[in-house]
C-alpha cells in the first residue's frame, strides 16, 4: 500500500498546517551580551540583571527519563524506551524551580547529557508558573541567580518590574501601614537577598516601635502592621519579607 504524500506518518493531513519561523535559528549557544554584562557586573545589580533578560532567549534542559525497561539477552535490565522531559530543581528556600541556562557550555557543565532547548524569557516564565513553580533558577550551580514569583509574573506578561526595595508602590504600602498602627513610629526597607540567590526573604522591613511597649503590645502591633501590609496588596509587589525591629531614639 502506497502512503499518501498529503498526510504525515500518523495519517493526519498536512493541509492547513503552518510552521513558525525559529527565531533562534542562528543562535551560537553563547550567553547573550546584555545578560553576560549584567552577570559580570561588580557589584551585581539585581534589577539590571532582571531587565537584561527581557526579550532574550534562555536554554531549558531536556533530560531523558526512562519509560519502559526490559530484560536483555544476558539477564540484565535494559532500557526499552525513554522520554525527554523538563526537570525541576529544589531551591535554597525550599521551593521548586525550572532551571534555565544562558549558554550551552553552562548547561553541559551542569549536566552533560542535557539537551538544550532555546526559549524566550516570556515563555519560560509562563511555563514555570503553569507548572506550579514560583522560581526560575538561572545557571544552577556556584553562580546561580534566581527569579522570584513577582518577577516571573512581570516577565511573562512583559510588564514593568517593581523594585521591591525602592519601588513607589512598596513605599506607599509601608507608609500606609505605619500610619494605621499607632505603636509603629517608622519603617524602612532594605534588600534581604541582593545577590538573587534565594538565601533570605526578598526584603527586610525595619520597623521602629514606640518605646516602652510590653511584649504583648509589641506582638499585637506587629500583627496589625503585617495585616495592613497585606490588605494593601504588598504581596503583589514583593515575593517575601521579614520584619526587623530597630531602636528609635
Image: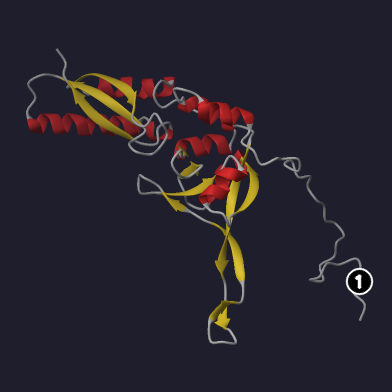
Quarter of the image with the N terminus is bottom right
Residue 204 is situated, as x and y percent measured from the top left of the image, at 30, 28
Q: Secondary structure at mark 1?
A: loop
Of residues 192 and 62, the one nearer the viewer is 62
Q: Which residue is mark 1?
A: 4
Q: What residue lies at 51% left-to-right and 42% top-to-bottom? A: 139
Q: How many marks?
A: 1
Q: Which quadrant of the structure image shows residue 67?
A: bottom right
Of residues 109 and 146, the one nearer the viewer is 109
Q: Residue furthest top?
A: 249
Relative to 214, is 209 on the left or the right?
right
Of residues 98 and 7, the one nearer the viewer is 98
Residue 29 drawn above or below residue 180:
below
Q: What residue lies at 40% left-to-right and 47% top-to-bottom? A: 91
Quarter of the image with the C terminus is top left
Q: Which quadrant of the structure image shows residue 219?
A: top left
Q: What residue lies at 53% left-to-right and 87% top-to-bottom? A: 75
Q: Which quadrant of the structure image shows residue 102?
A: top right
Of residues 179 and 52, the one nearer the viewer is 52
Residue 10 is situated, as x and y percent measured from the top left of the image, at 79, 71
Residue 136 drawn above or below residue 41:
below
Residue 193 is situated, as x and y percent measured from the top left of the image, at 36, 32
Residue 101 in sight here: yes
Amino acid at each position: 500500500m502506497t502512503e499518501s504524500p498529503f498526510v504525515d506518518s500518523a495519517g493526519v493531513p498536512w493541509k492547513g498546517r503552518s510552521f513558525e519561523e525559529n527565531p533562534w535559528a542562528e543562535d551560537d549557544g553563547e550567553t547573550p551580551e546584555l545578560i553576560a554584562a549584567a552577570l559580570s557586573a561588580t557589584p551585581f545589580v539585581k534589577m539590571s540583571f532582571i531587565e537584561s533578560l527581557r526579550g532574550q532567549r534562555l536554554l531549558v534542559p531536556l533530560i531523558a527519563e526512562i519509560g519502559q525497561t526490559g530484560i536483555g539477552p544476558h539477564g540484565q535490565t535494559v532500557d526499552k524506551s525513554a522520554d525527554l522531559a523538563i526537570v525541576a530543581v529544589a531551591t535554597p528556600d525550599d521551593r521548586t524551580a525550572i532551571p534555565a541556562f544562558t549558554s550551552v557550555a553552562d548547561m553541559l557543565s551542569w549536566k552533560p547529557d542535557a539537551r538544550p532547548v532555546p526559549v524566550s524569557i516570556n515563555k519560560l516564565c509562563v511555563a514555570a508558573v503553569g507548572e506550579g513553580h514560583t522560581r526560575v533558577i538561572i545557571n544552577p550551580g556556584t553562580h546561580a541567580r534566581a527569579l522570584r514569583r513577582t518577577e516571573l509574573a512581570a516577565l511573562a506578561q512583559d510588564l514593568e518590574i517593581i523594585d521591591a526595595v525602592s519601588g513607589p508602590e512598596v513605599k506607599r504600602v509601608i507608609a500606609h501601614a505605619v500610619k494605621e498602627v499607632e505603636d509603629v513610629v517608622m519603617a524602612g526597607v532594605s534588600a534581604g537577598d541582593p545577590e538573587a540567590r534565594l538565601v533570605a526573604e526578598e526584603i527586610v522591613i525595619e520597623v521602629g516601635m514606640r518605646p516602652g511597649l510590653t511584649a504583648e503590645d509589641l506582638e499585637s502591633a506587629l500583627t496589625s502592621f503585617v495585616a495592613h501590609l497585606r490588605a494593601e496588596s504588598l504581596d503583589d509587589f514583593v515575593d517575601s519579607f521579614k520584619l526587623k525591629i530597630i531602636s528609635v531614639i
